[in-house]
Amino acid sequence: MASKLWEKNFEVNQEIERFTVGRDREMDMYLAPYDVLGSMAHITMLKSIGLLSADELQVLLGELRSIYKDAVEGCFEIEEGVEDVHSQVELMLTRRLGDVGKKIHSGRSRNDQVLVDLKLYTRHEISEVALLTRELFDSLTAASQRYRNVLMPGYTHLQVAMPSSFGLWFGAYAESLVDDMYYLQAAWRITNRNPLGSAAGYGSSFPLNRTMTTRLLGFDSMDYNVVYAQMCRGKMERNVAFALATIAGTMAKLAYDACLFNSQNFQFVRLPKECTTGSSIMPHKKNPDVFELIRAKSNKIQSLPQQVMLIMNNLPSGYFRDLQIIKEVFLPAFDELKDCLAMTRYIIERMEVNEHILDDSRYDAMFSVEEVNRLAAAGMPFRDAYKKVGLDIEAGTFRASHDIHHTHEGSIGNLCNDDIRQLMADVMESFHFDKVAAAEKQLIG
């Protein structure tokens, strides 16, 4: 069994080890490539301050690139008895290079290692979430344009209210994703700061060049104060979780609408056959299981900020093992959200829209406001027009005209989709994903 990096002259009880290690090995597999990237930047900096020779640096970088390749290709493993990814990487280097492998830990702690790993992993996942969100946005705006002239009922209190359109319905969810992206942008800015060099939270007596590692890893800036660098663990995850939760909230609401509109009592949309399931007893059933699961998974993700908050909420400054548990709820959430985004986009692009909803006279009353406005525009006082139309509806003499003309910004006749697309383009450009990709590519070689 491999010894621990911190082990002295005694062994920990195996049950205690099992309890304290928990799911760390499993969770650290998410972090493996990023642990290697952080180590590559760190040792490059160590050479610049004279703690490694040029030859030692090149040998270490060569081995780390090999380990990185294994990690991204799924060939990396954390061995039984090895605590975490940091220990595994150092163990592999020491086996292959001898004492040179032991030099990579100078000037750092596993605390700032996991901090930088989490930051690198999280910013990569944020970029993937952003791109998938943009793809769903594009599908929604395309559907909004395609069905811009197809009217449907709008509802308040689940009562038929006023004319809406599928252009408005699809477009509303597209614009909602723009606002969600502002949250994601804030999460990115908090995430994309370098904690490396804070060591155990109190810095190092080595003359570390933290500006150099910030540049090498493509961070926008660093977490300057070393105590704050440690304190931001948990805070970063909580704030990112809020961003993920806002996107999930949009998808949960969309999924609910789609399930409702797909039901026989509405028949506003028809979901793709491959996205529905049947019943073991009722041969007519086509259940919207995919959207129901998207709704449930999205609601689960909306609980993530509270889970993170309650784990780290009453901790003082400094490191505590409590923070380890955050990884168990935080790291897997990205895959779940990305899966929901991809599935939602798939269905939206294949959803069939009922273009004859208003042939059903039950929806005639939703044109009452149009008639009130027509009478008011012709000179009748609004309250008199309102009363007249109300009495006509009660008497059964109201006759709806489907000929409506809404022209103001954001209305049925003026969706402003080009303006909404520009908002999304602006927020996407502000992330500067290309800067990060270039820095990582240069580091990997």
Image: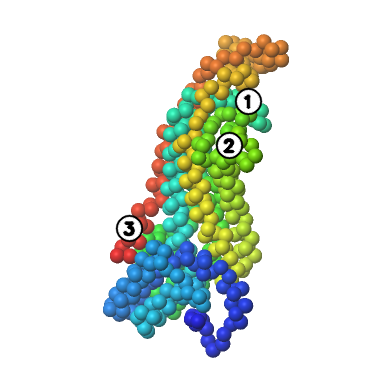
Label 2 CA crowd tier, 10 Å (few <14, some 14–19, many 20+): some
Looking at the picture, does residue 66 appear above or below residue 238?
Answer: below
Q: Is residue 28 among the parts visible in the rendering? A: yes
Report the residue marked by disc 3. 438
Q: Residue at x 35, y 61 (%)?
A: 440
User: Horizontal placement of 211 versus 344: left or right?
Assistant: left
Q: Which mark, residue 286?
A: 2
Q: Is disc 3 placed on a helix, strand or loop?
A: helix
Residue 260 at x, y percent in the picture = 61, 35
Mark 1 to mark 2: distance in Å? 29 Å
* Point 49% across, 44% down: residue: 343
Q: Local crowd at mark 1 within 10 Å, few (<14), some, or many (≥20)?
A: some
Secondary structure beneath label 2: loop
Q: Is residue 261 above or below residue 200?
A: above
Q: Which mark is residue 329?
A: none
Q: Nearer the viewer, residue 284 or 360?
A: 284
Three-letter residue code for mark 3: Ala
Separation (CA) of disc 3 from disc 1? 52 Å
- The label nearer to you, 3 versus 2, is 2
Q: Nearer the viewer, residue 288 or 340?
A: 288
In contact (CB < 8 Å): disc 3 and disc 1: no
- The CA span between labels 3 and 2 is 48 Å
Q: Based on the displayed image, in which of its 4 quarters is residue 284 positioned? A: top right
**Residue 112 image position (x, y, % from top left):** 48, 70
Q: Quadrant of the C terminus?
A: bottom left
Identify residue for label 1.
Answer: 161
What residue is at 33 percent from the left and 75 percent from the top?
60
Query: Is residue 110 at all visible to an observer of this figure?
Result: no
Spot occupied by residue 227 in the image (x, y as percentages of width and height): 52, 70
Please state which amino acid type lies under the numbered disc 2.
Answer: Lys
Q: Residue at x 58, y 46 (%)?
A: 293
